[in-house]
Image (spheres, helix red, strand yellow):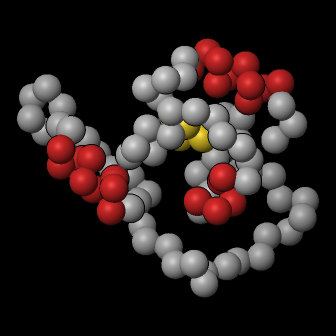
Amino acid sequence: MKQAYEAQENFRKPNGEKVILENIIPLHDNETKELPEEYECPFLTNEIWISATGNISPCCAPDNLRKSLGDFGNIETTLLKMFYKVQFTSNL
């Protein structure tokens, strides 16, 4: 979260405005919430998430859960069409 706010401050829009950060809330490692096993994430395969550091993810879950899906690269080195090819051909 800290990195997102730092990036927002350091990398502004061409007109000088800050990029809008949505759904940026602090989570603590000890916060857990059980989800039913049949739960299907409404975001998975419908959106991509790019972190403040440029990491690409198919999911908005907390970091430890999101990383369990795999490494999808960084926006600076990965073409988005390659991300979609990997995402839709893998069994997420």
Q: Position of residue 30 (x, y in %)?
A: 60, 84
Q: Residue at x 43, y 38 (%)?
A: 54
In the figure, residue 26 lies in which quadrant? bottom left
* On screen, residue 56 above or below 60: above
Q: Nearer the viewer, residue 39 or 90?
A: 90
Q: Is residue 85 visible?
A: yes
Which residue occupies the extreme bottom position in the image?
A: 30
In the figure, residue 1 lies in which quadrant? bottom left
* On screen, residue 76 above or below 68: above
User: Is 59 displayed left or right of 16 in the figure?
Assistant: right
Q: Position of residue 40 (x, y in %)?
A: 81, 52
Q: Residue at x 77, y 76 (%)?
A: 34
Q: Position of residue 6 (x, y in %)?
A: 24, 54
- Quarter occupied by the C terminus: top right
User: Is 27 displayed left or right of 17 in the figure?
Assistant: right
Which residue occupies the extreme left position in the image?
A: 16
* On screen, residue 33 above or below 87: below
Q: Is residue 47 visible?
A: no
Q: Position of residue 27 (x, y in %)?
A: 50, 73
Q: Residue at x 33, y 56 (%)?
A: 3
Q: Residue at x 32, y 62 (%)?
A: 2
- Give the number of callouts: 0
User: Is 90 displayed left or right of 13 in the figure?
Assistant: right
